[in-house]
Structure formats: structure tokens, C-alpha cells
Image (cartoon, rainbow, N blue to C red):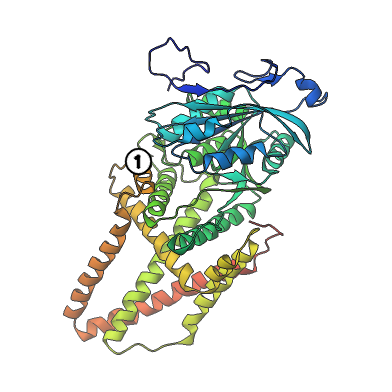
């Protein structure tokens, strides 16, 4: 992919990206890395000590509702990035107009002293590489900086987030990237959206805690709010024969880059203190498209072999969490479907006998969910109720299982689907693919009911006699796993 120059010649009639640069009345001179403007008294502003430089890149697609909050969050940091590039791509709303209100030079006084930054807004128009193309465009603008701070167009961070990330990554040259702890602000939502956000908050919390307890080794340096070493980027590009850090081959560009950084000999970490709120999915279709894309992309990275241009790396250390996640989802799917089928079969023969032992897994799951909710730094009453009332967490698990099944079936069928386009369509309110698992399950249940009615009593009894013990063993092992997670030390981490 080729990138246009930072300054656009107005006489050039070829299609180019448009850059908004409204400079305020500050005397400037170009003394830093390419495309950076610093005040003439830069050394006086930041004392005599040399410090690292941070270039922030915000890929933005239809973010008119959130981009102002994102920029306000960055300009309110105790450590303000040295330059902020908003890269607007394929947008059809007023993202450029809203972001342009912040364009220009800013002198900001924080507890760390007086700091200078400048905001640039780039409208790169139609971009076939979507977010990946926007990220690579931004990288071309800040490749001379020490670090690249990637921020999504709907992510806001705590005031000290950049300071915390910079402090850690500069303290250890082995670190190639550090991610903030992600959550979602649940306050503006009601109804179905509130339920979905509560589920996503719990899901984020579990993922964050799992990575924190693995020596703070982060499996995925999410693009929502992560800082990267540009030196690590250059090594990744050299080792993988890439012209850009991010490649368009993968459905999960951040996961692939994280694997490549790790393979280049760097550490990928999660900060225990830097925090950011990301944009959540508030509709079933949007959540489905996002989760299917994530799961599908993870499968591509996990699978031993070749899918497109993405090489499967099943034994990569960053993928251990992915294997555990997919294994746990497969067990959850088996236990729930097997229980429903065996229960229905037993009731049809009047052979079901309730045992209180079956309540133990439910109690263990509730206890584990409640402990996870208590671990949240900014937990709310909704988070506790979501975990405590059984039904909300169970309903959300069924939704996640539908995403899991859709992603694996799509992958195994080798069906070519543009999951990026599917997610964009779903976020605009289109698409009904999220109902497909329900339709399939209903059809399967009807078929199984017909087959069951055609079997003789002896065969039916034999199936139940074999099925219940198998389900019991799997459930016992699953419950034991939940118990071990429940008693595991969390070392004071808050997610």
C-alpha cells in the first residue's frame, strides 16, 4: 500500500487523502521525527532530559458520536502524546468534521509540566484495506517516533493511562508492546443493550485476568489502547518480509501482530494499572459479527496449516490462551446440548429422577462469576446481579456458543466471507445471520425428536444409560476446573 505525503498539493488532481491542519498561534519549528511539529522552546518545556517520543494513531470509521470524547481523553492525559493522527477511512458520517475541531497545536499543562502536542486529521477516503490500511497509513506518519500509541475511535482512557504505559515500556527494552486493561462503560445503556454490555464486561474481565495471572503476558495487544515499540515493528517487518506492521490477510490483525512481535523475541504485556473503556456492541447482530470475526481469525492463527496467506501457528505461546478458550467453549457446548437432549429423552420415558448433585455445577459457576464481578475495578450493581442471578450469565453463554459454532462452521466449510464487511453491515443495523444458529438448532431438535420416536424402548434406554454417565464425568471435570479457578490467588489484580 502506498501512502500520500503529509502535506497535499492543492494543484494535484489525483485522488489523495485530505489532511486537516489548523495551526493555532504558536511559533513552530520542525526539529523532531518526520511529520512532527514542536514548539521552539521544546527543551525548556520538558527540562534538559531527553525523553521518549510517542506518536498516536486513531483509525476512525463512522465515529462521529465518540471521536470527540476520544480526543478529549487523550488531551487530558498526564502524559500527552507528542502528536495525534486521526486517520478517517471509508466514513459516511461527520467524523472528519467533529475531529477537525481539535486539529492544530495544543499546549497543555499537567502535573508532569507543560506539554505540547498537535492533532492532525486525515481523510483517506475509500480504503479497501479498512482498519488495517488506516493503521499502516498512521504508522507511516509516526515511524520516526520511539513508540506508537494505537487508539480506537471509540476508546477513552483514564487520565494516567499513557503515563503508565510509557513508564513500563521504557523501563525494559525487551518489551515490544503493552496493552491497557479494557472494559466498557455501562452507564448509558438500558434494556437489551444493558444486558449485552454486562456480558461483554464480564467477558473482558475474564480475559484480562487470565492474561494478568500468566505473568502479565498479553496474548493480544488489542488496538483499542496499546503502545508499541517502533523498533519492534521494524524487526517484525524485516523478519516477515512485510512493508507494513499490519497485514490485511488476517481477520484479527492485532492478534497476528502480537504473535509476530513475540516471535521476534519481544515481550507482549498487559498493564496492571492503565485502563481504557472501549465501545461495546449493543445489538445482537453487531455482537455476533464482531465475535464471529474474532473467533474466526483466532482459529486461522491456531490451525496447523495454511489458510489464505495466514500461516497457522498452533504451538505459539500467545495462542495457549486461545486453545484454552476454544476448548472451554467446546466443553460448554457439549454439556448444555447433551443435558437438554438427555433430559428430554428421560422425560419422554418418565425416567428422569432429580438429584441435588446437579446443583453443584450451577452453584460453582455462580460463585466464580460473582468473584469475577468483584474483581472488576469499576464494578456496578448490574455486574453483581448479572453474575448472581444465573439466568443472565447463562443466556449470554448461549449467545457466545452461537458465535463459537458459527465461526467454526464457517472456517471448516472454507466459505469465503468478508467478516470485516459483515461486522460493518451489522453495526449499521443490517444482517440477520445471528439468527442462523437458532434456526439450525430448532431444525436439529425436530429431526432428533422424530428419530427418537422411531427408536424402540430398549435402544432409548441404552442411550440414556450410556449418555448420563458420560455427561456426569464431563460435568465433574468441568466443575473441578471451575473450583480451581475459584480458589486461585489473584494477587490483588483488578480488572
**Residue 8 seen in the current view:** yes
| Residue nearest the observer in this picture, 492 or 73 | 73
Q: Is residue 51 above or below residue 447?
A: above
Residue found at the far right of this picture: 48
Badge 1: few (under 14), some or many (20 or more) residues near its Cα, within 10 Å?
few
Residue found at the far top of this picture: 11
Considering the image in quadrants, where does the N terminus appear?
top left
- For the point 72% across and 34% down, the residue is 170
Instruction: Please indicate whether residue 4 sits to the left or right of residue 417 in the image.
Output: right
Instruction: Please indicate whether residue 417 sits to the left or right of residue 390 in the image.
Output: left
Q: Is residue 152 above or below residue 397?
A: above
Instruction: Please indicate whether residue 493 sits to the left or right of residue 235 in the image.
Output: right
Considering the image in quadrants, where does the C terminus appear?
bottom right
| Residue nearest the observer in this picture, 283 or 257 | 283
Quadrant of the rendered structure where residue 220 is?
top right
Q: x, y (%) of residue 386?
A: 52, 68
- For the point 45% across and 33% down, the residue is 132
**Residue 240 seen in the current view:** no
| Residue nearest the observer in this picture, 408 or 191 | 191
Q: x, y (%) of residue 489?
A: 68, 63
Q: x, y (%) of residue 471?
A: 40, 75
Residue found at the far left of this picture: 454
Quadrant of the rendered structure where residue 379 is?
bottom right
Q: x, y (%) of residue 257?
A: 51, 36
Q: Which residue is mark 1?
A: 421
Amino acid at each position: 500500500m502506498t501512502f500520500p505525503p503529509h502535506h497535499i498539493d492543492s494543484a494535484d488532481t489525483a485522488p489523495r487523502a485530505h489532511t486537516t491542519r489548523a495551526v493555532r498561534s504558536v511559533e513552530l519549528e520542525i526539529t523532531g521525527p518526520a511529520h512532527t511539529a514542536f514548539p521552539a522552546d521544546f527543551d525548556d518545556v520538558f527540562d534538559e532530559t531527553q525523553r521518549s517520543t510517542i506518536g498516536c494513531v486513531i483509525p476512525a470509521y463512522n465515529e462521529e458520536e465518540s471521536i470527540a470524547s476520544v480526543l478529549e481523553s487523550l488531551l487530558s492525559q498526564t502524559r500527552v502524546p507528542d502528536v495525534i493522527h486521526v486517520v478517517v477511512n471509508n466514513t459516511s458520517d461527520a467524523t472528519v468534521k467533529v475531529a477537525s475541531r481539535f486539529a492544530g497545536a495544543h499546549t497543555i499543562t499537567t502535573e508532569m509540566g507543560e506539554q505540547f502536542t498537535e492533532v492532525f486529521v486525515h481523510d483517506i477516503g475509500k480504503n479497501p484495506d479498512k482498519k488495517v490500511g488506516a493503521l499502516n497509513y498512521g504508522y507511516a506518519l509516526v515511524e520516526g517516533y520511539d513508540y506508537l500509541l494505537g487508539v480506537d475511535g471509540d476508546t477513552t482512557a483514564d487520565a494516567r493511562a499513557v503515563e503508565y504505559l510509557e513508564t513500563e515500556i521504557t523501563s525494559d527494552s525487551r518489551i515490544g508492546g503493552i496493552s491497557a486493561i479494557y472494559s466498557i462503560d455501562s452507564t448509558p445503556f438500558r434494556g437489551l443493550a444493558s444486558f449485552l454490555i454486562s456480558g461483554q464486561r464480564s467477558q473482558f474481565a475474564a480475559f484480562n485476568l487470565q492474561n494478568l495471572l500468566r505473568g502479565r503476558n498479553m496474548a493480544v495487544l488489542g488496538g483499542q489502547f496499546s503502545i508499541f515499540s517502533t523498533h519492534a515493528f521494524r524487526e517484525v517487518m524485516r523478519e516477515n518480509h512485510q512493508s507494513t506492521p499490519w497485514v490485511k490477510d488476517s481477520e484479527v490483525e492485532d492478534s497476528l501482530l502480537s504473535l509476530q512481535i513475540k516471535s521476534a523475541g519481544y515481550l507482549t504485556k498487559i498493564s496492571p494499572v492503565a485502563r481504557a473503556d472501549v465501545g461495546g456492541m449493543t445489538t445482537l447482530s453487531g455482537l455476533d459479527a464482531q465475535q464471529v470475526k474474532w473467533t474466526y481469525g483466532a482459529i486461522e492463527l491456531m490451525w496447523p496449516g495454511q489458510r489464505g496467506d495466514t500461516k497457522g501457528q498452533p504451538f505459539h505461546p500467545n495462542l495457549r490462551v486461545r486453545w484454552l478458550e476454544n476448548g472451554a467453549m467446546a466443553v460448554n457446548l457439549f454439556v448444555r446440548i447433551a443435558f437438554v437432549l438427555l433430559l428430554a429423552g428421560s422425560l419422554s420415558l418418565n425416567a428422569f429422577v432429580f438429584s441435588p448433585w446437579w446443583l453443584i455445577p450451577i452453584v460453582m459457576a455462580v460463585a466464580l462469576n460473582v468473584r469475577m464481578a468483584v474483581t472488576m475495578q469499576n464494578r456496578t450493581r448490574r455486574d453483581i446481579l448479572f453474575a448472581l442471578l444465573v439466568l443472565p450469565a447463562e443466556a449470554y453463554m448461549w449467545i457466545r456458543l452461537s458465535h463459537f459454532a458459527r465461526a467454526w462452521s464457517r472456517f471448516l466449510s472454507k466459505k469465503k466471507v468478508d467478516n470485516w464487511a459483515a461486522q460493518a453491515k451489522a453495526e449499521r443495523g443490517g444482517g440477520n445471520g445471528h439468527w442462523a444458529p437458532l434456526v439450525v438448532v430448532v431444525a436439529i431438535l425436530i429431526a432428533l425428536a422424530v428419530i427418537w420416536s422411531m427408536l424402540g424402548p430398549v435402544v432409548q434406554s441404552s442411550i440414556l444409560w450410556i449418555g448420563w454417565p458420560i455427561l456426569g464425568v464431563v460435568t465433574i471435570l468441568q466443575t473441578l476446573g471451575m473450583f480451581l479457578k475459584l480458589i486461585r490467588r489473584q494477587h490483588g489484580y483488578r480488572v
